[in-house]
């Protein structure tokens, strides 16, 4: 990146960091069960609920407890369940039509990051009916109070229940963009482990590593605060203590609860301190090829950490201590290497590969341009890179050509278990 652009990026990021204490961040009120929501809805004088979810979650019956609780309290509701992974402008438009037709006045985002992002975007459009989603792209373009918005995460990874961002994919261009504003932070976050019990092992792993990516990118960036560092360290600790347990035993309620807490803490960290190039690259892949976001983050994370080099070793060493991989007396470089190696080992245990087979070489300049546009100047990354430098990561993510048909079969074993992507646990 040239010197003038570096100066511009760092000046922009410094200005945001100085403004942090004065910005209207808030933390959603946490409740522990979906059965509490009818009381919340009554107290807020709302009359009809739009539940935004996806077909996989409906099929698994995860919304049934909420539906029964609403029925018992006599609260009318309708359900939009067509949300796709990497929700599109079409999803948002359809859900808005249902909201208006049914006379709803509050929204529950129920699912992974995709459902919650769709719910946020719907709320933004209801609040600003004369403005298109595309015109809300970027920072602080909503600035109007949304209808009562509640978030029920069914995965422990996206942190979307805590954040001010909604990531939407344009249905025509496949360009994925973020809307960032404080009114998008849900009023209530429901951390109910019972709705995560049926999550398949692979999605449990990739969404858990999504939360890990949030915590790590928030911690190693240049816009941290005491609070975001504390939240990120707690998230990393909880993830390393619980992710293998929930992967091997999905019925472990306590471990599921701890992973939800980890995702929440990681969300609190990155909503103030932002993420970095891992997310920018992952978003471009999700928009272009519909690659599940948690999977993309998991594949990309260690290679970006290595590329940052010694610049982040001190911070990675502190993360290694939080993860139980090192102690305070471990040499910094050694502790940092242990942390990156632990992420690589985690990927192997969970069957997550090192490549994104969907990438086409002809798309790389466009994808790198999208990542550059998203990340610079907003993300306070430890090392600045331009689009040309980001292209390197896309080439690293492309599988090496196989020497034979047999080699091709061996080197391209599927990294996603059959059918698991039907459940919207991918995040954004």
Image (cartoon, helix red, strand yellow):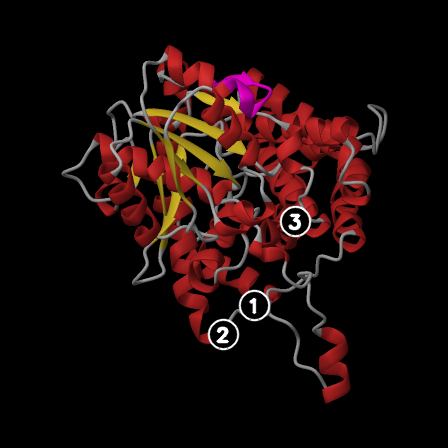
Horizontal and vertical percent position of residue 288? 43, 63
Q: Is residue 357 above or below residue 373?
A: below
Which label sits in the foreground, 3 or 2? 3
Horizontal and vertical percent position of residue 349? 81, 52
Answer left or right for 153 relative to 402: left
Mark 2, other Cα within 10 Å: few <14 / some 14–19 / many ≥20? few
* Spatial separation of the CA atoms under disc 1 and disc 2: 8 Å
Are the two marked residues, 1 and 2, in contact with CB atoms closer than 8 angstroms?
yes
Q: How many marks?
A: 3
Residue at point 77% right, 44% down? 247
Are the two marked residues, 1 and 3, in contact with CB atoms closer than 8 angstroms?
no
Answer left or right for 193 relative to 359: right
What residue does disc 3 label?
A: 203
The residue tagged with tag 2: helix, strand or loop? helix
Mark 3, other Cα within 10 Å: few <14 / some 14–19 / many ≥20? many
Which portion, as a residue range, is magenta?
27-36
Horizontal and vertical percent position of residue 77? 38, 32
Horizontal and vertical percent position of residue 93? 27, 48
Residue at point 55% right, 36% down? 64
What residue does disc 2 label?
A: 361
Q: Earlier in the sequence, mark 1 or mark 2?
A: 2
What residue does disc 1 label?
A: 395
Which label sits in the foreground, 1 or 3? 3
| Residue at the limit of the structure toward the top, as seen here | 43
């Amino acid at each position: 990146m040239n010197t003038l652009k570096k100066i511009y990026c760092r000046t922009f990021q410094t200005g945001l960091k100085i403004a942090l204490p004065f910005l209207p961040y808030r933390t959603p009120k946490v409740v522990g069960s979906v059965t509490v929501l009818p009381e919340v809805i009554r107290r807020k004088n709302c009359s009809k609920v739009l539940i935004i979810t996806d077909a996989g979650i409906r099929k698994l019956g995860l919304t049934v407890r909420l539906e029964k609780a609403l029925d018992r309290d006599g609260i009318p509701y309708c359900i939009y369940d067509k949300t796709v992974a990497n929700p599109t402008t079409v999803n948002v438009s359809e859900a808005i039509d249902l909201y208006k037709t049914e006379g709803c006045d509050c929204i529950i985002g129920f699912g992974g990051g995709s459902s919650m992002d769709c719910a946020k975007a719907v709320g933004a459009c209801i609040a600003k009916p004369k403005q298109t989603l595309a015109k809300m792209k970027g920072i602080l373009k909503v600035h109007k109070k949304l209808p009562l918005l509640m978030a029920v995460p069914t995965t422990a990874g996206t942190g979307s229940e805590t954040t001010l961002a909604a990531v939407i994919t344009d249905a025509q261009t496949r360009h994925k963009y973020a809307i960032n504003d404080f009114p998008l932070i849900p009023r209530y976050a429901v951390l109910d482990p019972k709705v995560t019990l049926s999550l398949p092992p692979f999605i449990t792993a990739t969404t858990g590593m999504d939360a890990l990516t949030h915590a790590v990118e928030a911690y190693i960036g240049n816009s941290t605060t005491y609070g975001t560092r504390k939240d990120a360290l707690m998230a990393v600790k909880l993830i390393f203590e619980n992710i293998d347990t929930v992967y091997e035993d999905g019925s472990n309620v306590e471990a599921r609860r701890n992973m939800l807490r980890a995702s929440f803490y990681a969300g609190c960290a990155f909503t103030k301190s932002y993420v970095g190039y891992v997310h920018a690259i992952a978003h471009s892949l999700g928009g272009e090829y519909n690659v599940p976001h948690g999977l993309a983050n998991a594949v990309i994370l260690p290679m970006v950490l290595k590329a940052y080099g010694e610049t982040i070793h001190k911070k990675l060493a502190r993360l290694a201590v939080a993860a139980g991989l090192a102690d305070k007396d471990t040499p910094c470089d050694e502790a940092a290497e242990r942390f990156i190696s632990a992420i690589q080992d985690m990927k192997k245990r969970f069957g997550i590969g090192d490549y994104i087979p969907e990438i086409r070489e002809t798309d790389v300049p466009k994808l790198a341009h999208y990542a550059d546009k998203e990340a610079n100047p907003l993300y306070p990354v430890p090392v600045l890179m331009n689009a040309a430098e980001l292209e390197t990561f896309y080439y690293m993510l492309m599988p090496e050509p196989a020497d034979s048909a047999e080699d091709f079969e061996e080197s391209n074993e599927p990294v996603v278990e059959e059918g698991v992507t039907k459940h919207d646990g991918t995040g954004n």
